[in-house]
Amino acid sequence: MRRFLLLACLVLSAALQGCADRRIPAEFQAYADAPYSLGPGDRLRVIVFGQDSLSNSYAVDSSGKIAMPLIGFVPATGRSPSELAREIAARLRAGYIRDPQVSVEVEAYRPFFILGEVTTAGQYPFVNGMSVETAVAIAGGYTARARKDDAQVTRTRGDRTVTVDVPVTTPVRPGDTIYIPERFF
């Protein structure tokens, strides 16, 4: 009888372990709290005040650069829009425009990806304020075999990629890959 009670306690503690409050790792949280950094797939609106020929929409290409008239390719990946604006202004100031005033806005964010137990897995346009649960809704909802209480989110920043199990209320960032796992029973 004692062995049975011991085994029952072990099984119960293992089952309750799954209910424990999961903490999101600090490194992943730091990515979520950091200012937005540009990457391939972003579409930018660059405005050079007083220079209509330079003001335009530019896409960040697969090498992480935008191509602008006069100054050529400007690295954008890993920079914030304000950092990119300062770089463009510095390049224009070096021989083209006396005192350039530059503004950079994100017109369209790079897409996010969703895989696993959703109706229509794939690539979707990013929407501001989106959570994992909203991303699932955009992908057509859960399948019958989906685990609905958590997901895995893979986020890349610079040369670091982090994959974390998160609750479905976790905010999604542009470029994230979300995986909805299958439930066991």
Image: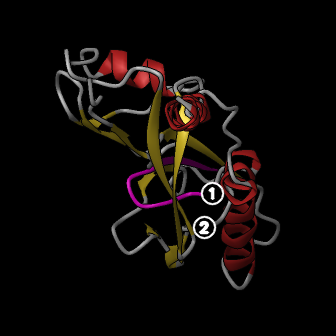
Tags 2 and 1 touching, CB below 8 Å: yes
- The residue that label 1 is drawn on is 37
Q: Quadrant of the C terminus?
A: top left
Q: Position of residue 76 (x, y in %)?
A: 55, 67
Mark 1 nearby-residue class (10 Å; few <14, some 14–19, many ≥20): some
| Residue 46 shown left or right of residue 35 in the figure | left
Q: Is residue 108 visible?
A: yes
Q: Which residues are magenta?
A: 37-49
**Mark 2 vs mark 1: which is more N-terminal?**
1
Tell which of 20 and 12 is nearer to you: 12
Q: Is residue 38 magenta?
A: yes
> At label 1, which amino acid type do we have?
Ser
Tell which of 158 and 73 is nearer to you: 158
Q: Is residue 172 visible?
A: no
Task: State the SS at label 1.
Answer: loop
Position of residue 25 relative to residue 87, above or below, is: above
> At label 2, which amino acid type do we have?
Gly
Position of residue 4 relative to residue 65, above or below, is: above
Tell which of 55 and 131 is nearer to you: 131
Q: Position of residue 164 (x, y in %)?
A: 53, 50
Residue at position x 23%, y 29% in the image? 117
- The residue that label 2 is drawn on is 78
* Total tally of numbered discs in the picture: 2
Q: What is the spatial separation of the Cα atoms under label 2 and label 1, in whole angstroms?
A: 5 Å
Q: Residue furthest bottom?
A: 95
Tell which of 76 and 136 is nearer to you: 136
Q: Position of residue 100 (x, y in %)?
A: 76, 63
